Image (cartoon, helix red, strand yellow):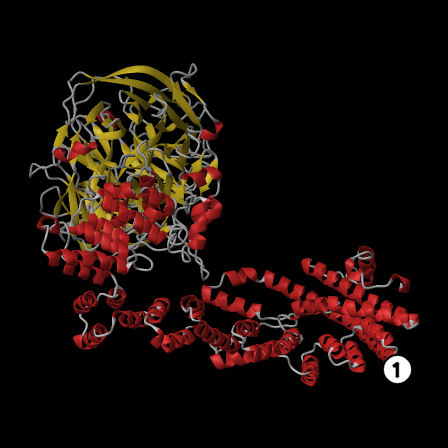
Amino acid sequence: MKNLKILKEELVNLSLNSEDEIISFAAFDLERNRVFLASSSNFIYNLLLPSSSNNAGAWNSISDNLIDLEPGDFITSMDYLMEKEALIIGTSYGLLLLYTADDNMTQIVGRLEGGVKCISPSPDGDLLGVITGFGQILMMTPDWDVLYEMALDDLPEDIDVHEHTYSSNYSSESPISWRGDGKYFATLSRVNNSQPLHKKLKIWERDSGVLHSVSESNPFMGSTLDWMPSGAKIAAVYDQKEDRKCPSIVFFERNGLQRSSFCLNVEIDATVELVKWNCNSDLLAAVVRGEKYDSLKIWFLSNNHWYLKQEIRYMKDDRVRFMWDPIKPLQLVSWTISGHITTYNFVWNTAVMNNSVGLVIDDSKILVTPLSLSLIPPPMYLFCLKFPSAIQSMTFCSKSSMNHLAASLSDGRLCVVELPAIDCWEELEDKEFDMEACSFDSGYKSFIHLAWLDSHKLLGVSHNQISNSAIKESSKDELSMYCLQEIELMCSEDRIPNSVTCSGWQAKGLNRLSLEGTVIGIVPDQENGCSAYVQFDGGKVFEYALKVADARGLHQKRDDMSFSSSCPWMDLVQIGGCLPQKSLLFGLDENGRLLVGERTLCNNCSSFSFYSNSADHTVTHLILATKQDLLFIIDISDVLKGELEVKYGNFLPVFKRRKGEDERNYIQIWERGARIVGVLHGDESAIILQTVRGNLECIYPRKLVLASIINALIQGRYKDALLMVRRQRIDFNVIIDHCGWQNFVRSAAEFVKQVNNLSYITEFVCSIKNENIMETLYKNYISLPHDNEAKAVEHGDLKSSHSNSKINSVLLAIRKALEEHVTESPARELCILTTLARSDPPALEQALERIKLIREKELSGSDDLRRELYPSAEEALKHLLWLSDSEAVFEAALGLYDLNLAAIVALNSQKDPKEFLPYLQELENMPPVLMQYNIDLRLQRFESALQHIVSAGDSYFEDSMTLMKKNPQLFPLGLQLIIDSVKRNKVLEAWGDHLSSTKCFEDAAATYLCCSCLDKALKAYRECGNWGGVLTVAGLIKLGKEEVLQLAQELCEELQALGKPGDAAKIALEYCADVGAGINFLVSAREWEEALRTAFLHRRDDLVLEVKTASLECASSLVSEYEEGLEKVGKYLTRYLGVRQRRLLLAAKLQSDERSINDLDDDTASETSSNFSGMSAYTLGTRKGSAASINSKASTKAREMRRQRNRGKIRAGSPGEELGLVEHLKGMALTSGAKRELRSLLICLVMLQKEDIAKKLQHVATNFQLSQMAAVKLADEAMLNDRVNEHFYVLDNYIPKIKEEMQHSELFSWQSKVLI
């Protein structure tokens, strides 16, 4: 659904050399963008066409040269040969001339008998087809050698073509038409002994000249013939005057068979002189000569219907001719015999207006299709408007439910029509309305551009040519002026409601401005009223506004409104809402650049449109399609913030996807070449695409659908939102999560009242999930702010707290709303049961309670009127069983201790009676308390079961003990329920036994003490190593002195074995009175000061000597260890620096190969990255992927065990060697225990008069600590840099720094200042 519009016209008048001279032929030089014109006086005119690099409207280098021919000889055919860079000219005397325009040289390359009738080079330029006056076809090479010759027409054998008298009645066009690839060419040939107009279409092979196929004899009109460049069809014209029909254009296939045709809708006597395809094979143009005027008509095929998209009228005396640009499909050059030359630049505009109304131009009709009411496929339509003549341009305005349309016709007249509101258009179906032209004389020809300023004012741009003095030698420019005119409209007829007002319109010109430059577009600004933006060729944009206009009526409002290049497609949109209120002018140039002012949004755009979900038409989304057939939905806020490149990746397809990534920023258009033609705004949220073949496709992008749903929810239109969710199959949780479920809970009553459909509410309830889908499922489509409270609940408490969870809170709110705002009915009760069944966890007991009440009312038989307001108990139960697990419902019925209800549930859930009846009968025969106890055990409600079994009496105490032992969490409850002290002690002892079995010995000991089980308490303390508790309990038991001594000695041995010699020393000294053993334990614990003090306390010189000897041995050992550690620090640091250097070199090599890795496909790239991640710093070559990618569980466990066993080792060449060395260096630091022992040893040595040994030990330990700290700092800094400087990263450079920084640090508090 698109219309062909004239973008701009470029005009020039040639000054011919004589009054009777006319232009006869034209040829196009593609390389230099120039046109050659041949006149009847044998002059060749050379014109350079306007281009984008030149100023708009400028024609260059207009020159003429005379071809010197014999008297009476004249030019009969002409074409341009790119290979020769010259014109090939044929004359009536048979001369073939090669004319070079640059040096004005003419060369005779051949002479043909009978004259030259036409010349047609092949598309590749390798062959030249010539038809002579004798009707012979000659095929020549570039060297002017004749390959073959054959007769054009079918003539009797006894006739010699060379005896024919040459006729001067030449065809204006070549009867030879080549296929686009040059393999075949077609001609029209006369048929012997037939009617004069009957001819045959002949298809010839290029290489041999063999006749490939022939059509049937048909009444072809003249020699009009053109082969579609794509090669699919050959266009010709039928003359149907004998049948009293207008001419028709017919299409043939290569085999000579007719494929299709269409009538031209012109007078019967009209003739078609010329038919030409454009280079894209999508437009067909023809010159139709009528009785009153000639016209240039352009057709377009869509959905097997030929639309007349443009008609340009000329005077009869102009004898207009034309040709398409060879490479620009929408540029056409026309000329008249008097030398009036016009270049038309066309542009395709969408026929769908901003309010989703399709207005398709077809000749003198506008086919109206309201796409918002129904997606009617073209060429069908709802109704049509018929105008007095063909339509050249039109504009549409929709404001305040009124719709106005204005059309500029090919005869220069203006028509206006007022349409009713779109809601009333269904009454206009299949109707055709005849339009009347306005009474208006503009003094100009048709308007090229039209725009509504408001409902009663138009702004139009027309083109007027003022013929200046003779243009020759390109000395002066053609004054080509555009005129901008404001038009006021009035209707003299009374408007009839809901009808079309198509007559009585009057137009009055208010302002007329002459413009310097070429206007290529107008876009109205209806929000500001009576203003519009006018774009000139080159991209400059000016505003037309009467209130603020200067003397010219135009001014440049903002610099950012102009484009950096000409944009044939331009649209002005209003943005607002939560964004700043402003207007944005978008433009799309011919190179596919989408611009906002001079800022480029996209470099490969093919079409674009806008979407608005609000009633004030404020735009919220930009929709664009790219040349790669990708559809992007872009938030206007992203356009304002300039975040398009980051979010949409330059609008290019993503060829490589990594695992875990979700690319949802575009939609792949399924058919190549499809374009955006329109958008359905508001709740429809649809995009209308039209494929190349013409059919319409309507898609509903999820991003737009979600935006429209959220907009409806924000406006409080819950019913509309729910209907959109159901129609588009969106997750129902959008309604809850769009701004937090707490907000929905507050508006649940309004939701229920608006929806007012229990079936829809039931469906909604069944879809609620305990997650925020706006942050999971739809996080890539739309983002909304959530308050902190909602986020905290959603992220933290959803699963832990059922009372505050999303599901339970929402269902509770809906249940309350149903009970308060919906009248009682069976459907309401079923909906309430649904809310209970869908709770988390399901509130089945509450649901069964409601069913139980219904059943009791049924059994009582009272209040028959109210019984109709509820479903039957069986129906309600079946509904609950359908929503829930039948076994869970059965257990919930048992939990109510209602055996009859449980039996009914079992029967309705299709259980086998043999399975549940014996069990229910067994329960029925039990006492109530035991029945409840057994049901609780089945349902694993152990607390309730314990309460019931305790209440059953003392005879069931053993059962309660068994229950608590099997479920230890019941012991606290059991102590609360059981009052008898004896039984409580048994419970406590059993609890202590359980705690001992679970190795909770401290708690077990305390529990045993509560029930006076002292032996078990002593054993528990002994198991956990609490020697104080053991000896205390021994005192409570009142053990004898010998027994306590033996127990103390055993404890000493156990503590020594457990690595607690300090504790063993206390027991030996305090309970065993063994000073020697105590000091030995203190020496083992390296408590040197305490050992020396104790020896002096007991005046034991032998023990003092023993302490002295042990301290000296320990000092010597430590000195050796620290010296060895100092060597290890240097060795590990040197190793680390070497590994770091090699890894950096490898990383640089991998980075240089990164591009080649990224170019691989996903699987290869993944495998390559896996191989590189396993490479060590010593790897010199690439690794090959392992053939076995999946290992068994046994081998995985074995590998893990080896890793645990070898964790302390750093294997050379392993991937973790570098980090392992750093961690090992950090692990060599002095621990707090080592520092405490070291300080104690130093003080002990000083006390024993061994200052030299103490000083040596402190010096060695200090050097080791400084070296270790310096090595760690060096490694950390080297890890942050990409280069390893061998001279900078040296340990000797870091030790002084550490010594200066840590001089008074707590890390060196173990030192003795006297020993420094």
Vertical comparison of 506 with 1162: above or below:
above
Q: Report the side of 719 relative to 640 (left or right).
A: left
* Image quarter in which the C terminus is found: bottom right
x, y percent for residue 958: 38, 78
x, y percent for residue 461: 33, 24
Name the residue tied to disc 1. Answer: 1102
Considering depth in this image, is 350 or 1109 the residue closer to the camera? 1109
Dividing the picture into quadrants, the one containing residue 1110 is bottom right
Dividing the picture into quadrants, the one containing residue 771 is bottom left
x, y percent for residue 392: 26, 30
Mark 1: few, some, or many residues within 10 Å (few <14, many ≥20)?
few
**Residue at position x 61%, y 73% in the image:** 1181
Q: Report the side of 44 relative to 170 (left or right).
A: right
Residue 491 visible? The answer is: yes
**Residue at position x 48%, y 75% in the image:** 1189
Dividing the picture into quadrants, the one containing residue 563 is top left
* Image quarter in which the N terminus is found: top left
Considering depth in this image, is 659 or 1022 the residue closer to the camera? 1022
Vertical comparison of 1285 with 71: above or below:
below
Vertical comparison of 1067 with 789: above or below:
below
